[in-house]
Structure formats: structure tokens, C-alpha cells
Amino acid sequence: MEYSFREIEKKWQYKWKQDKVYHVPNQSSKPKMYVLDMFPYPSGAGLHVGHPLGYIASDIFSRYKRLQGYNVLHPMGFDAFGLPAEQYAIDHGIHPAISTDQNIQNFKDQLHNIGFSYDWSREIKTSDPHYYRWTQWIFLQLFNSWYNRKSQKAESITGLIKIFETEGNDQYPFPNDRFRISITGSHIFSANEWNTFGEEERMNILIEYRLAYCGIGEVNWCEALGTVLANDEVVNGVSERGGHPVVKKKLRQWYLRITEYADRLLKGLQTVDFTDAMKEMQTNWIGKSSGAEIDFAIQDHPEKILKVYTTRPDTIFGVDFMVLAPEHNLVDLFTTTDQKNAVEEYIQFVQSRSERERMAEKKISGVFTGAFALNPFDGRQIPVWISEYVLAGYGTGAIMAVPSGDERDHKFAQHFNIPITNIIGDHYNGIEANPTKDAVLQNSGFLNGISMREALEPVIDKLEEQKIGTRKVNFKMRDAAFSRQRYWGEPFPITWKNGIAYPLDENKLPVILPPMDEIKPGKDGEGPLSNNEEWINNDLFEGGHAESSTMPGYAGSSWYFLRYMDPGNDKAFCDRSIADYWGQVDLYIGGTEHAVGHLLYSRMWTKALFDLGYIGFDEPFKKLLNQGMIQGSSRFVYRVHGTNQFVSFGLKDQYQVDAIHADVNFVDGLVLDQQAFRKWKAEYANAEFILENGVYICGAEVEKMSKSKFNTVNPDDIVEKYGADTFRMYEMFLGPIDQSKPWDTKGIEGVHRFLKKCWRLFMDDVKGLIVTDDKTAPAELKILHKTIRKIEEDTERFSFNTAVSTFMIAVNELGELKCHKKEILLPLLVLLTPYAPHIAEELYLQLKKVDSKLELATILDMAWPAWDQKHLVESSKEYPISINGKLRTTMIISLEASPSEVETMVLANEVVQKWVEGKSPKKIIFVKNKMVNLVV
RNA sequence: GCGGAUGUGGUGAAAUUGGUAGACACGCCAGACUUAGGAUCUGGUGCCGCGAGGCAUGGGGGUUCGAGUCCCUCCAUCCGCACCA
């Protein structure tokens, strides 16, 4: 009986589904294990071989833990809202709900082919009203909460109202310290004042505290398309589609007050098992810094002060100029008549620049406003400039520039010939800035002679004493923009009345996204929903009107791991007792591209739900494993310029050629299938080929796997040709899970051969099952037990590539010994089950036919074998013998031998004597079980 | 610009704690079996050299008896940067 993988895999996939073997109960006496993949966005292109990499890893781990006796939750679902479906709808007139469902079906078929152990009864999709009902519900919880800085947690807004009624906001300042109450102009109000405020004023104050709130934000606005664009839809200041100009536009937006969680998001990193790189990225994104806000007076504008934030107040005497973000609201006022034209021109230029461009720009640009600030300590005049390198959103949108200590400031000063004050003596060389904190200050008034590090605190004290500055902790992270001017997302459970946002009652949920025949942008930057007046003014909104924006992609993905636990619940997003049983995700697998977006948002949502008492843990993911990308290996053909002739790689240098991507699916290794190529596109139908050695050889290059580069490989094709087990093991065999590596279909045959060899240990093409009950030999036991140990170690540390090699070695070695003994092969089969479940299940079935003691319905529920040290003991080792660190020979030496015995043996060795040349060795280094090194 | 990661044979890689560099595969070469091979099996394969031997983990320097691994420095490539998901 030969290894007919197609038949076997189809059979078991069907049977496993019939028997519901992947159904996971919410109650069990077994320990729990939650293994989760980052759920996919179901794109129209379907899966390519890069996508399942992480899924295979998590599936292996899930199955491995199941064998070890865990109740393993391993679900899958779809992040189904998003821009591409909406764009597809605009381009093709197909409603996103329809194209999304088609895509999901396609994804599921592809996933099913690979034999994953997902419990599909728990499938979710974020665009399903049964799901987004709870996304809206959580939004309402955030809207109805505020962050109490005293208790350091989210609390109900009704509690805050009580505080305001009895004591005002004296103890609970506005999170945005620049906010002023419109009627009083103050940032403080008393209980009496609160009680006299009208409805509008109260709501306007409350929204300043809510965790979900409305504010004004800047977006990329494309007038010609009438729509807001994502950063990656903007290329060099124009829209990717159509090349129309894009400018910044201020729009009302929803936000989540994630900044209130900044400190806890930082602290929480200490409790989770993420890579250091990941923690570092999140830490940098949060960007906590401490320093001071300093008030600068402005000459001729006694009524205004210019606030700057700096982490280095110790350098205050080295300030040679100020830089404001061009958007800073005092720019207009400060600009002198002389400079007005230049400033306006510059602002217009900056308007067209994306934040990314501004930060990446190497060319220094800026304009002098004509105004001068005054140094608060010595009254020195400081010119005020504007430049794009200062961003409005960070700090106060203005900096004090210290060219001797900051590289960007230094370049700016050099470029515009601004004189540089040296406050650090020899530490500054006049050529480049030195950001040291260790220098002793000079030219620094009352700070002269003090080291910078020691000056930091006294300066802040003095600033506070003189009321010209305050100690300040700052975060680079901004509140998360939570609305999109799009159709295909969750509607907000909000009604607008007289310009005030009111929450809808929970029993009104879900607010269903209305079907629309045509999806096009609304007026004035509003989302497509604004065109549907009937819906906007629906009775549901209680006489008010609906929010026309929808929620962003990350809304649904910020909590989906909770819904899998209790997907059918229509009373709660997840039953508390079930959330308590499953708890944190034990292993979360996905790409690093989510390092600072999804992962921070879901961590924040988890903390908020924890604060409000809905779940019992405040970090969602205990361990995070990042999978690398699988890159494409592109193939090129070389067309002789201006002809329809294609010249093979080795001969291309003799011609003037254009390299053209050829579809990798009709290239075998590097050899082009000329017929397939001709059939590919009409323009190649009559292609002529200049061959070398009778074949056409393509060029190759590693690039991102993408349709446009014709280097995508569909897992369906691979599974059809080699089987799911081969595919799974080959993906793992490619290399470490966390590293990027190119796909090479050619290499898969080694893994396929391995599975066939493995099959032949059990089955003979003619005789059928050849497994025996013969007694085992020590050599065979040694192979088995070292394999168990290694597979266990490697699986635990997610080193799946080395695990696959270990299987190969074991099968090679057992093959050499012609071992067909059940006592060896059955445990081996259990080891193989997580990696290649179909073949393992089939061979188990074959074994069951001859062994009545095997009675489990499926090998998936066998017990993981234990390895025993007694089969692994060695009595001697082949030692490497080095002279002066260079390997010269090896010697087999007993592990019992004492150092002096080893020394004698080594010195007596012929090769050693030759190299020592009669000299007596200076030193002999002997490390037991490792090596011997002679120093002569 | 800022942040993160990665550089080892022709290719994917291994070397888990500083101790025999290249396991396991792909490819290639030679052979066996075969009407045939995109099947199976055997042997070989880092580079230079006839050989003794020498040289090799992106480049340069350092620590050490010993460095792919630790330190310094330079270079290259990839990824992220807030409306792609």
C-alpha cells in the first residue's frame, strides 16, 4: 500500500469534521491552554503560502498541548471590516458584505485544506451584527467612563458627575490641560458652578473626561476624490489613485483616551512574555519622557507666552533660537509684516507634506517669523523660527533649540547661520552637537560649574519657584483616532442632538449598518453614510441624527480574543465565568507589523474592561510569538529590447534586454515552461526563445510576495501536489519561525521524501503493514528517546525547523537499522501527530487493525510519550583535540577518564606529538564532555 | 529622520550555556536499478591547493587557551512610523 496522501488527507479532514474532534468545551477537568492566531483580513487575493506560516506553528503547538493533556482553545475568525472591500465596492459595484463573505468562504476552504484543528463552531466575523453589537457595547462602556488618575483606573462617568456636584473638578483636572470652559474661560470649576451649568456645558465638560470622546483632528484630504485618504494612499503629496493634490484638513473625529493608560501600558510590559524588541518598540511608541514646560515671553507681545516642552531644561542658557510647528496657533500673531509672505508661503508648502515626509526629510527648511522670545533667566533675545521638523502634535508644538546639544538643532543653526552658544566647553567641537549629560556647564548663569545631570532638578525647581515653568511628563503617544469617514465599519451607537453626542441605550444595540446601493463619499469630508438621510434621521436616533463616521479596523480586533471564549452569547460580550476559565491567551502568534497598533489597542481595551469589572485580567496576551514573512522568489525573463525574443539568463549579457517578471508558477526551479509562458498573455503568444543547453533559464530575485510581482504561490496548489502534511512540515522546515525567508517550491521534495520514507517504515507497497512486535534493541531505543527529548524541547521553544530535521534524522537512522518495531514506531507516530496529523492518523488506523489494545478513536488523543535518560547514557566521547586552538585530530576517550589520564593519552597521540614537536605544552585545557586544547 | 530586525556554502539553514562551523534538506556531480524517469537507492559536494596544508560565519579591530556566539566600530539589506489590515 503506497502513501496516497490525497486520499488519506481528504478522508481524515472529512472524518474529523463529522466527528467534531476539534470541538472544545468551556468546562473541563484538564488544564486550559489558549492558543491564538492573529485573525486575517479576508482579502480578495486569497491566501498565499506566506499567510499560513503562523497558523501552522500555532496548530502544531495546539495539537502538541492537546497530546499533553490540555483543554486547548484554538479558534479562528475574520477581521472583516476594512478599506479594500469598500474600495472594491466603489470600483465594481459589489456590496462589501457580499464580497467579504465570498472571500471568507475562499479563505476557509484554503485553511480547511491544510488540516488545521480550529474549533469552527467558535468562528467570528467582525462585520456580523451579532459580533459588532458588542463592539458597540464596549464603545458605550468607554464613552460612559473616565480615567481616575487617583485610583489609576477607568470608572463610571456617573461617579465623576457626583464628584462634580459635590466638589467641582479641583482634584480631577481636565486630561487635556489646555482645555478651557467656554463660559468661564477657566480650567477649574466649583461644585456650585457645575450645578449652574446648563446641559450643553456639562456635556462639553464630560466629553473632555470620557475614554471615548470627540475632538478635532487633521486628516489627509483629497478635494478631487472628495474623501479622506490613508497615509499609504498618499504618495509624494498626491493621491495614489489619480494623482490629485492632498492637503491637511481639520475634521471632527472620535478618539480613545489611550494616553491615560500610557503608564500602565508600560508597566504591563513587565508582566508579559514578548520579545525585548517588541517591548522596546512599544516603549518607544509610548515615548515617555520627563522634563519641563517652560514659558518664554515674546518681545512686543506681553500678553502672550510661548510654552515649550523640553527634556533638557539644564541647557536653557544654550538656547539660540526657538522653533514652532508651522501649524502652531501663535505663528500668525508673532509673524512680523516683513516676514509675512515668507511664512505664509512656507506654511502652504508644509500643508502638502505628510508627517512621514516631514520626519524623513533630510533637507533643512524653515522660516524666521521676525519675532524674538526672551530667555527667562538672562533676558537674551532668541529668534523664533518655524520649521516642519517640529510637529504640532507632540509636546507643545514648540521647542527651544540648543544647537550645541542637539543634532537637528545644530544642523538647522548651521544652515541658517544662527550663532551657536557653547555651554559645554571642550565637549562641543564646533562641528557636531554633543547630547551629553556629563559635561560641566559654562556660559550658563547660575548653573555655571554644575554638571548637566545635576543641574536638571535645580533648574526645574527654579522654574517652578519663579512660576515660569513646571515639571512635566510627556508621552509621544497620542490619543487614538477612532473614527473613519468610511462606510464599511461599525456604526457608532451615538445620536447627535444640537451638536452634542449622546449615547444610545444598550437595548438599542446593535445599530445596524444600513445597506446602501451606492457607496460614495459624503459632503464636506463626511462618510458615505451621510448620503443615507433616511438612516441618519432614523427613529432609532431618538430625534437626533446618526454619526456618519464608522469605527476603524482595529475596533473589532481589539477584543475578538474574548468573543471566541463565548461566541454565541447574546446577553454579554462574554460570560464572566467563562472569561475566568480561559483567562489570558497563553500563546499569541502574528506578525511584528502589529507591534504598535493592534497590540497596544487590544491591551488598552483589556485594561478598560478589567477596570470596569468585566474580566479578571488586564493583559490579554501572556506570550507573543512573532512570525517572519515568507518572501517571494521572483523569476525574470529577458526580452531583447524592442523585439519579441527572450534570451536565457546566461546569454542575456550579449543583448540589450528588459527584465520582465514571469509567473513563478510556470517556472520549474529556474527552467521556464515556454508553452505556459506563451499562453500567459496575448503579447507573449508568439514569443521566441534564445536557449542555452536546450532550455530557457530565468533570473531570480527575492522580493516581497505579491500579485504584482507574479511570485505568489497558492497553498492549494502545493497541497494538491504534495499534500497538506508535506506543506505543513515544509513551511516549518524553511527556517526559524520568527525570521523572514524566501519561499522555494523546489525544496519541498526533501520533506515529501521524508514522509514517504516514514510511511515505508510502517507499510510496504506490496505486503501492506510490516510493523512487528519484536523486542527492541538498545540502539533503537536510543534513537526513539533522543528523538522524543529533542522534539519536546524544540516544540516548547518554537524551534519547529530543527524539530523537522530531528524527525528526518530519526527516520533515516531507523531506516538504516531496518526497524519496523511497533514499540518504537508507535511513540514516534505520536510525536509526528502535531506536525503531520493526517499521515499519523492513517498509520494509527493501520496499527489498530492488528493491535486490539489500541482503542482510541483518534491518535489526536494519545498521550505524549515520556523519554527516559537511561536509554541515552554514553560511556565515551569523541573529543576534538586542538593545538593552540586549531583542531588537529579527534580521540575517543572514556567519560570516566580523569584529567591526568586524558592528558597522558592526548600527549601520547601521534598527531599531537607531531604538532608539539617535542616541546612541552605550556598548558592543557580539558573540559569534560567538550574538548581538549593544548597551548604550546 | 526615529525605532526594530537580519547578514554563515550555489540555496534554505544548524551550531540551545564561549568549546569539532556547515547538522538536516534543496541543488549539483558520479553510480545502481529501469523500456523510461520529475520514481527509488548508494557515494561525493564550503573555498584555494597535486599534496602537506592554508583560508573561511558582511568588513575592520578587541577580549580569550578557544569567538558565528561577548565588546567596539563601520557597511549592507529588510520591516514599522498613528486612516492598509
Image (cartoon, helix red, strand yellow):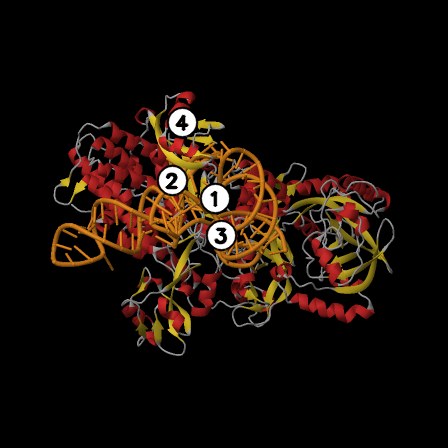
Q: Amino acid at mark 1?
A: Phe
Label 2 neighbourhood size at 10 Å, few (<14), some (14-19), many (20+)?
A: many
Q: Is residue A218 above or below residue A796?
A: below
Q: Chain of mark 2?
A: A
Q: Secondary structure at mark 4?
A: helix
Which badge, 2 or 4, is on the more N-terminal residue?
2
Q: Quadrant of residue A883?
A: top left
For disc 4, the marked residue is A907
Work out how far the residue at label 2 is from the one at label 4, CA to CA, in angstroms: 50 Å
Q: Amino acid at mark 4?
A: Leu
Q: Secondary structure at mark 3?
A: loop
- The residue lying at 51 percent from left, 41 percent from top is A274
For disc 1, the marked residue is A573
For disc 3, the marked residue is A510
Nearer the observer: mark 2 or 4; the answer is: 4
Work out how far the residue at label 1 is from the one at label 2, CA to CA, in angstroms: 27 Å
- The residue nearer to you, when weighing A86 against A593, is A593
Using residue A139 as the reference point, say whether residue A463 is left or right of it: right
Q: Is residue A162 above or below residue A402?
A: above
Work out how far the residue at label 3 is from the one at label 4, CA to CA, in angstroms: 84 Å
- The residue nearer to you, when weighing A708 against A450, is A450
For disc 2, the marked residue is A61
- The residue lying at 44 percent from left, 65 percent from top is A88
Asked if one can make out residue A422 in the rendered structure from this viewpoint, the answer is yes
Q: Secondary structure at mark 1?
A: loop
Q: Chain of mark 1?
A: A
Which badge, 1 or 2, is on the more N-terminal residue?
2
Which badge, 4 or 1, is on the more N-terminal residue?
1
Q: Amino acid at mark 2?
A: Phe
Asked if one can make out residue A123 in the rendered structure from this viewpoint, the answer is no
Q: Amino acid at mark 3?
A: Pro
